[in-house]
Image: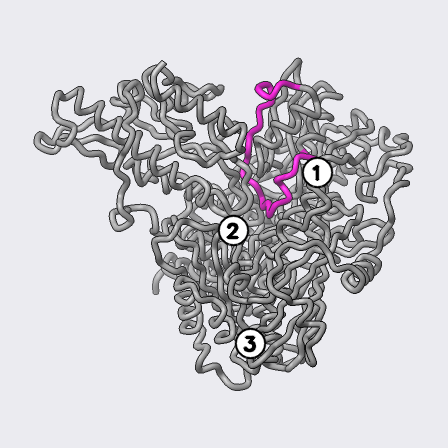
Amino acid sequence: MDNQTVSRRNFLKTSAVTGAVFSLGFYWPSNAKSAKVINTADANKFGVEMNSWVHIDASGKVTIFDHRAEMGQGSYQAVPQIVAEELEVNLNEINVVFAQGDAKKYGNQVTGGSSTVRGSYKNLLKLSATAREMLIQAAATKWSVPKLECYAEGGHVFHKPSGKKFHYGELVEAASKLEAPKDVVLKKRSEYKLIGKPLRRLDTPLKTNGVAVFGLDKQIPGMMYAAVERNPRLRGKVKSFDDTATRKIVGVKNVFKVKMGVFNTYREGVAVVADSTWAAIQGKKALKVEWDDTGFEHLDTETIYKRQAEALQTQEGLVFKKQGEPTEIIAKAAKKIDVTYETPYQYHAAMEPLNCVAHYQDDKLEIWGPIQAPEWVQDYISKEMSIPKEKVTVNMTFLGGGFGRKAFMDYPHEAAVISKEIKAPVQVVWTREDDATQGPFRPGITYRCEGVINNGEIDAFKVRMAGQNNDHWRGGKKDVANRSTSEGFLKPYTESIKNLAIMDVPFETPIPTMWWRSVYASTNGFAYESFLDELAQEAGKDPLEFRRAYLKEERLQTLIDKVEQVSGWKNRARGAGYGVAITECFASTVAQVVKVSKAPGGGVKIDQVWAVMDCGWYVNPDTIKAQIEGSIVMALGAATIHEVKFKDGKAVDNNFSTYQMPRITDIPSIEIHIMDNDEDAGGVGEPGLPPFAPALTNAIFDLTGKRIRKLPFSLIGV
Amino acid sequence: MAKITLNINKKEYPLEADPQMPLLWAIRDLAGLKGTKYGCGVAQCGACVVHLNGEAVRSCVTKVSRAVGKQVVTIEGLSETNSHPIQKAWQEVDVPQCGYCHSGQIMSAVVLLREKPNPTDQDIDDAMAGNICRCGTYLRIRKAIHVAAEEQKKLAPQG
């Protein structure tokens, strides 16, 4: 046993205890004693494994594994763009393949928290450079020349003095048997040929001719189709059902009750299995089901917000952060601001409704689907169905949007249960109505914000939120404040505001809630950044200058300078309203300025949005711009168009006919800037969302003097 | 069930289908062409748009029987080499994110460009308002249609 093997084993042992998954050393290339060929059905296709991400076949074809889900945010581009840089291969000559769920090989594969690049780029750079050095060494050895005389470029190793060359395929077997060098030298940022460049996405051509395989497009031989009528009252059960009419529909083969896990709770439904999607959907419509939903309160939206408001009047809440004497100052103040903000429940509404293919046979299970968290699915189903983890194979297809919803395990679990029951492969198709009404949803939250201004400065700042805690669905402790109580709020405020309290007033409902793009920042940002604007107004100060005074860090000052400059903040046009908001989300900070004016037909219209993103080190500026554009559109919908409403314990709107979405006619002009600095990489897919709603409502206040404290609101109704 | 023949992308598909089945599911499940997408089932999102005798239709609410004897074109049949001016413009502008809605977006845009070779922003908004993109690629859709219009002009016979 060599040192390398020892260190790898030690790491695995450590990681099991600490849960650390991003440490170096974990992603170590193979060496003499542990070199192996990839262990999948496609092994021969991909050749020798240099490390978990890089395989090279004898012809020199390089395959790069994307260990994360591709749901539009660009992992399919970012991971290869990083790897190819240090490996020295041409991006247009490689294969990209989605990795299967395998936490031992890839660490954390949960595509959430905008973490693909920031969570793995240092390791990807190092392992790619290491593989490159091993290939160069293998060439030098073959030529019997000093390694220093050789260099790698475009998938080849060249001997400089003689001009001789090998392609990687001629070297990979020898290279994979070498001892991995310990300290490879990584390129400087100025030396990058690929990273930092706005390269076109590798997956785009697959998405303009119908070739990309999404979950719903997956087909395997002998596959049946299933639709499931689930209890419309969230988390309820099936009492009985009548399938007489269903069984008369041509193509329907089987009808039975199913139970699927939603984290640590369950929901029940009736599955209809058929030989086509259409027959399954028709069969589902023909079912008569009697539901058992005793034990769950049948809530209405009005009741939820009434209770949140009451809780904020009667309870102090759990302390998330407290310093100084904010409560005492507020109690004694002659004048205070005491305002309430409300945000709605939201539905993810990915264009690809949930679906999953499962094939259970003998003692093993294989899953294919639009899955954000393959190793969670593997782990969860292994436990729920008592199948050893190594016998549960989870394959990610392209995802037709995810936004957090496809990180849950309910829909793959349901598909697996149905496949086991019918002893055949099956694709479970969720109709749009199923997808829209079953949750989990982003929680709607009420915030009570109290503050005191003294001599133009914040003397006391107190924010309390009442909203569901997503962690409770995964067994989180109920006697501690929600860990996301201040998510979105810039941390330096909590250092520069001396008397400050951030509190969580516990609030529960039976409605399943979970992550939605930018998670709590998507709703917190509205409250914190609107409240700051109200404090600035009370202090009689310019909203941007007011913020600047509390954000002393140089990096933030530079960001503020930039947004001030690009938006023309100092020379704001008369007759228009300007609003600003700055939020932090997943290690990136985004400032946005929105300009509004009076609409000819009444209300207001958005003239322009300026967004400045500081995400530190980055891979592809065009992907970042696309993500910010998309985040702003999604934020616009959540602020001004849609919300999930509940009546009698059920989600009311079940399709786009009533759950309206932003369309091409709703979109303002957007100008995006990315900060250049040498800080560590931050997230890209989500941080562009939180500042939009408050920047918009702050702009409306600037224009009209009307303060909007409840989302969503109608632009034409302002 | 009835025996029917669909002509999809200039190829004959003899199928056995419930005449009430939406064209969408016949294309996807029976003909096995998965490029056309299911999004809502009620003609609200446009993910399922295909061409029926050259017109853009919502295949999720079009009965399969209506397509018999007509020419169906799906995203797979738009061009041999992914090279229709709209496809090329989509690639040049890097329009798609998740990509799921773009079969429908592209099929809608192709009809727009045929009918209005020099579309204004307003023309584009009018023609594309029926197609939802949850990733919010709308600004790039608009830009790409303008790019495709320019490209189409170059391809048009001179003089």
In magenta, the rendered stretch is: A387-411
| Secondary structure found at label 3 | strand
Which residue is located at x 80 percent, y 46 percent?
A: A510
The mark that comes first in sequence, 1 or 2, is 1
Q: Nearer the viewer, residue B154 or A676?
A: A676
Which residue is located at x 52 percent, y 35 percent?
A: A109
The amino acid at mark 1 is: Gly
Residue B124: horizontal and vertical position, in percent? Answer: 54, 64
The amino acid at mark 2 is: Phe
| Secondary structure found at label 1 | loop
* Mark 1 chain: A
Q: Are marks 1 and 2 in contact (CB under 8 Å)?
A: no
The mark that comes first in sequence, 1 or 3, is 3
Q: Nearer the viewer, residue A449 or A698?
A: A449
Q: Is residue A398 visible?
A: yes
Looking at the image, is B49 positioned above or below residue B16?
below
Queried whether the magenta region covers residue A389, the answer comes back as yes
Q: Nearer the viewer, mark 1 or mark 2?
A: 1
For the residues marked 3 and 2, what is the alpha-carbon distance in whole angstroms?
Answer: 29 Å
Mark 2 burial class by Cα count in 10 Å: few <14, some 14-19, many 20+: many
Q: Residue A457 has which mark? A: 3
Quadrant in the picture for the N terminus of chain A? top left
Looking at the image, is A40 positioned above or below residue A713?
above
Q: Are marks 1 and 3 in contact (CB under 8 Å)?
A: no
Q: Residue A586 has which mark? A: 2
Which residue is located at x 47 percent, y 65 percent?
A: A611
Residue A377 placement: quadrant: top right
* Mark 2 chain: A
| Secondary structure found at label 2 | loop
Residue A226: horizontal and vertical position, in percent? Answer: 73, 31
Q: Nearer the viewer, mark 3 or mark 2?
A: 3
